[in-house]
Amino acid sequence: MAAAFTAEHHDIDAGIEQYLADTAAPDPRQRAVPLQNAMAVLRRHIYLEEEIVFPHLPKGALMMPLMVMRKEHGEIWQRMDALEEILQDPAGDSTGVEQACAEILVLL
């Protein structure tokens, strides 16, 4: 299971990085597809960690790291929501999207 989660982390990073690298894409909607896919995978990934993995981990020594991860997940989720709003805007603020992507990458 750990290998699958690690692979997902790499896939999520790759989708975000592909969006950031593809600045010459003629169609902004097409450019956003890897990013939107990465966000969908990230939402599912966070859900699986929170609902399936974390409850089965020993509480003692891992209590603080789990609290930190839950806090980080909340921050990531807020940035994903903000990113989704920007992507749905027909005007398409690419600078805002790129900033949100950079923030998410730092948190990951």
Image (cartoon, rainbow, N blue to C red):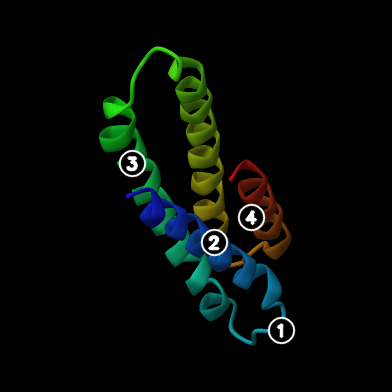
Do tag 3 and tag 4 residues touch (Cβ < 8 Å)? no
Seen as rendered, the residue at the extreme top is 60
Question: Mark 2: few, some, or many residues within 10 Å (few <14, many ≥20)?
Answer: many
Residue 18 point in image, percent of width and height: 61, 72
Mark 1 and mark 2: Cα distance apart in space: 17 Å
Task: Classify 10 Å Cα crowding around label 1: few (below 14), some (14-19), many (20 and above).
Answer: few
Residue plotted at (40% across, 12% down): 60
Q: CA distance from mark 1 to mark 4?
A: 17 Å
What secondary structure is marked by label 3?
Answer: helix
Q: Amino acid at mark 2?
A: Leu
The x, y position of residue 52, in whole percent, is 26, 36
Residue 108 visible in the shown view: yes
Residue highlighted by disc 4? 101
| Marks 2/3: CA–CA distance | 22 Å
Residue behind mark 3 = 47
Residue 57 relative to residue 32: left or right:
left
Instruction: Choose mark 1 or mark 2, whichever is in front.
Output: 1
Amino acid at circle 3 = Tyr
Residue visible at 62% across and 41% down? 107
Instruction: Give whichever of discs 2 and 3 has the lower sequence position.
Output: 3
Residue placed most toward the observer, 57 or 105: 57
- Left or right of 104? Residue 78 is left
Q: Earlier in the sequence, mark 4 or mark 2?
A: 2
Mark 3 or mark 4: which is in front? 3
Residue beneath label 1, please?
24
Q: Residue at x 27, y 34 (%)?
A: 51
Q: In whole angstroms, how far apart are the C-alphas of marks 3 and 4?
A: 20 Å
Taking depth in this image into account, of 106 and 83 the one nearest to the observer is 106
| Mark-to-mark CA distance, 1 and 3 | 33 Å
